[in-house]
Image (cartoon, rainbow, N blue to C red):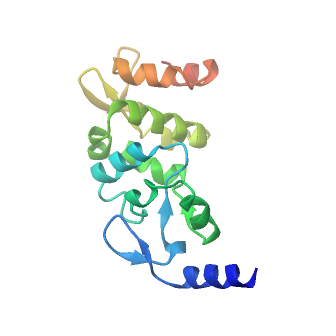
């Protein structure tokens, strides 16, 4: 309808979208998390990766309803890309601040999306029994954290797991 289109046009052209850094921008200058991250996981990422979450819409906005994502999609807001999300995995401070189970979930998503770009994947930090290393620095003797391995094993198929040598 004309009324609905008029409202959507007004929403698109106004800086009303609250970001995680307390600024307001037009919806097409903001980002939303992919749908596979639940509200709690989104909140954890925003709290623990300050530089990563500057352009993200305030996560508390989505706690009341998931339907807002549909509206933001109509207004030109884009999802965080796998490459952008991989910044969590390639920054040691970010990787250390994210719970291992969530880190594993992000790893699987980014690995699947970027697996063809082996150089990028080799820069991902993974949790060990004691500390973190990039995949490039791991060896056959490296002991990955058991919780990380268990998170990876369920969604990865045999070929993906073999390629990662886990």
Q: Is residue 118 left or right of residue 39?
A: right
Quarter containing the N terminus:
bottom right
Residue 90 picture location, percent across and down: 38, 45
Q: Residue furthest right?
A: 1
Please name the residue shown 29% across and 31% down the image.
Answer: 132
Q: In the depicted view, which residue is nearer to us: 50 or 62?
A: 62
Please name the residue shown 60% across and 72% down the image.
Answer: 75
Please name the residue shown 39% across and 24% down the image.
Answer: 148
Is 48 placed above or below 78 here?
A: above
**Which of the 4 image quarters holds residue 111?**
top right
Residue 18 picture location, percent across and down: 40, 71
Looking at the rendered structure, the number of numbered marks drawn on it comes to 0
Q: Residue furthest top?
A: 141
Q: Is residue 48 left or right of residue 34?
A: left
Q: Residue furthest left?
A: 130
Is 9 placed above or below 45 here?
A: below
Q: In the depicted view, which residue is nearer to us: 90 or 28?
A: 28
Residue 74 picture location, percent across and down: 64, 68
Q: In the depicted view, which residue is nearer to us: 141 or 17?
A: 17
Is 106 placed above or below 11 here?
A: above
Q: Is residue 113 left or right of residue 52?
A: right
Residue 25 picture location, percent across and down: 44, 77
């Amino acid at each position: 309808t004309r009324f609905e289109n008029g409202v959507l046009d007004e929403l698109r052209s106004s800086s009303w979208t609250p970001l995680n850094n307390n600024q307001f921008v037009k919806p097409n200058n903001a980002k939303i998390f992919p749908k596979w991250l639940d509200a709690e996981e989104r909140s954890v990422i925003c709290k623990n990766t300050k530089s990563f979450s500057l352009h993200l819409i305030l996560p508390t906005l989505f706690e009341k309803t998931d339907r807002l994502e549909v509206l933001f999609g109509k207004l030109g807001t884009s999802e965080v890309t796998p490459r952008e999300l991989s910044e969590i995995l390639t920054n040691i401070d970010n990787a250390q601040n994210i719970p291992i189970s969530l880190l594993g979930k992000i790893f699987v998503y980014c690995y699947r999306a970027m697996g063809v770009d082996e150089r990028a994947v080799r820069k991902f930090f993974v949790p060990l029994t004691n500390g973190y290393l990039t995949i490039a620095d791991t060896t056959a003797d490296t002991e990955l954290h058991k919780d990380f391995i268990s998170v990876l094993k369920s969604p990865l198929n045999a070929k993906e797991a073999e390629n990662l040598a886990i």
